[in-house]
Image: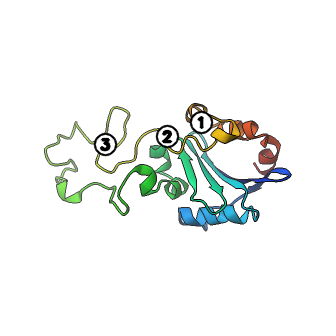
Amino acid sequence: MYFAALLARTEDGWEASDTELDDVETLSDLADLAREASPEEDTVFVLIEQEDSWFGLVRVDGEEDPRIFVSDASAAARSAYGELLLTDELLGREPGADDGPDLDALDLDGTEDGESEEDGDDDEEGGDTAAGSVPHGPVGDGRLLDDLGVTEKELRNMDPNEALADIAAALGASDVLETVR
């Protein structure tokens, strides 16, 4: 189950609104949606979580490029909403790089050239180690909440089930976020 909300800082404090991401196709669309929530160009966060799996934050400050943090890139990559956040730049890939397997290198049994069926292409944690793969664990700007009292270490160690509530509490926005949950 997904939850997505906008949290906008205003002169009166934080305002939260539930948001639908069904019509959002790119990170640029997401940033535009966030900017619309704050006509004064104040800070806006897009908060996204998939229960028991991952959470993501997008911080938009006026017309600046969005800053992104994703708690578990490999889990988010299996989600349509997560794919919005996992840009080539965030993952350290060349724009337009194909992150899928090289189909020409596959044998008919589905293994790569020179690889036994038992070897597979998974690392010890179960992730794909092929070139261009999505890393396990957090990616992005872990310091996007530093100025608001949440350190990179705290952000990276948050439980995905509690992260958005913990972030809202640190910002003094628990009540407004809870009203849209």
Q: Are marks 1 and 2 in contact (CB under 8 Å)?
A: yes
Q: Amino acid at mark 3?
A: Thr
Label located before the other in sequence (3 or 1) = 3
- In the shown orientation, is residue 60 left or right of residue 41? left
**Compared with residue 113, is residue 104 higher up or lower down, i.e. above or below?**
below
Label located before the other in sequence (1 or 2) = 2
Q: Secondary structure at mark 2?
A: loop
Residue where numbered disc 1 is placed: 155
Q: Secondary structure at mark 1?
A: helix
Residue depth check, mark 2 versus mark 3: number of the one nearer the observer: 2
Residue 43 in the image, given as x and y percentages of width and height: 70, 54
Q: Amino acid at mark 1?
A: Leu
Q: Amino acid at mark 2?
A: Pro
Q: Residues within 10 Å of mark 3 (few under 14, many from 20)?
A: some
The answer to which of 13 and 19 lies nearer the viewer is 13
Residue 1 in view, yes or no: no
